[in-house]
Image (cartoon, helix red, strand yellow):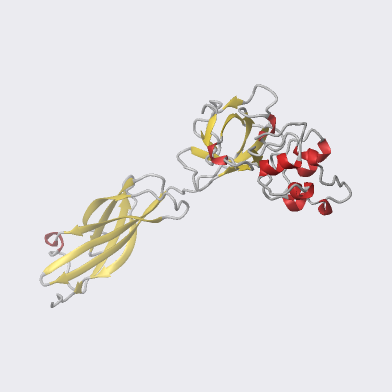
Amino acid sequence: MILPNTGITTSLVSSTIGQASNQVSTLCLSDKVNMYGFNSPDYLEQDKFFGKNPTERNVINQGVSKVGYPLGVFRGYDHNFVTFRNDEPYLDNTLSQFDGTIYVNLPIIPMGGTDITSTDHTFAVYFNRINDFTHTSHVAVNLGNNLGSYPNWYFTINVNNPPDGGAPLTPGSVVYFKIVHLSSPSRKWVGDDSITFPITLPVNPYSNIVYPNVYCFSSYISGTYYFGANIDIMSDTQANGIYTVFLECSTNSGFLNPVGGSVDIAYSDNKGNGGTPEDNGNGAINFSSSAINHQFSVGQTVYWHWHPAGTSSWQDLPTTTVTNTMPIDL
């Protein structure tokens, strides 16, 4: 209910806000008042009451600019009025997808009113690489205007396909947005009906590093040789992949007449933990006993080296010793 600008009475205010009192000071300080519903034509009254909680409305806390408790402050009062605090929006890194889609949440927080959850609003979003929205260099973000219903006001951009159609945006750079509130009367935001703000684009945290930890083994159990390696793939990537390991062993450090093999190991992405390689895949290479039993014997030193696909540069691994391992007697 919106009160008129004339004919204001204490009983009218009392019934509107649900405060059982006809004392003006009690009505002005009531916690039942929607402090964003004040719309007095008197600037001084409006300034001292709009958006102020009961403690702030108390004349004791208003210093030298006392206005008392005027009943007229309820002229034009709207008990169901909803306004928004237009704080600077922020980038929600918990939602940022480093495939290029960036979510920008707007902390346009509903304040006042009796039914804020049903209030939908329409906004226009403008983008620019520089802080200039006075000329035609800015463009509208092509999302339509509706940013959704309370409390999910947000918009997205893709850094690889920015709204202005230009080159991809640089991670860590600053871009600018202007939000214009289209669907409401002038008081629907505290202050102006538009805000301009910078957003620093997140830096991709992924190092895109992939490497194996190779653990070689050589043993002799009940007449059979067991040679090979268990391999953990450490990765810090945004996508799944395949890592190929080539492995050789030999009786000599020059790798004359080596025994070798390879394995393709699938590894998963490291999303949610970008920046630190983690164990995201496992595999093994097992050499056949027939391939090695004519070269190796118990107690002999085994030399190992490996390389990934795409290069033939071998990397040495720690040597092992052929051990005679007794079978477990269960």
- Residue at 50 percent across and 30 percent down: it is 161
- Residue at 69 percent across and 33 percent down: it is 187
Horizontal side, residue 269 vs residue 75: left or right: left
Looking at the picture, tell me which residue is in the foreground, 96 or 289.
96
Q: Looking at the rendering, which quadrant does residue 249 occupy?
A: bottom left
Horizontal side, residue 82 vs residue 319: left or right: right
Q: In this view, which residue lies farthest toward the right?
A: 64
Q: Looking at the rendering, which quadrant does residue 322 occupy?
A: bottom left
Q: How many marks?
A: 0
Looking at the picture, tell me which residue is in the foreground, 70 or 99.
70
Observer able to see residue 253: no
Horizontal side, residue 32 vs residue 323: left or right: right
Q: In this view, which residue lies farthest toward the top?
A: 136
- Residue at 74 percent across and 35 percent down: it is 39
Picture quarter with the C terminus: bottom left
Looking at the picture, tell me which residue is in the foreground, 131 or 120.
120
Which x, y percent locates residue 216? Answer: 27, 64
Picture quarter with the N terminus: top right
Horizontal side, residue 264 vs residue 289: left or right: right
Which x, y percent locates residue 14? Answer: 70, 44
Observer able to see residue 228: yes
User: In the displayed structure, would residue 25 be above or below residue 213?
Assistant: above
User: In the displayed structure, would residue 311 be above or below residue 259?
Assistant: above
- Residue at 64 percent across and 32 percent down: it is 178
Q: Looking at the rendering, which quadrant does residue 85 occupy?
A: top right
Which x, y percent locates residue 213? Answer: 34, 59
Which x, y percent locates residue 17? Answer: 67, 44
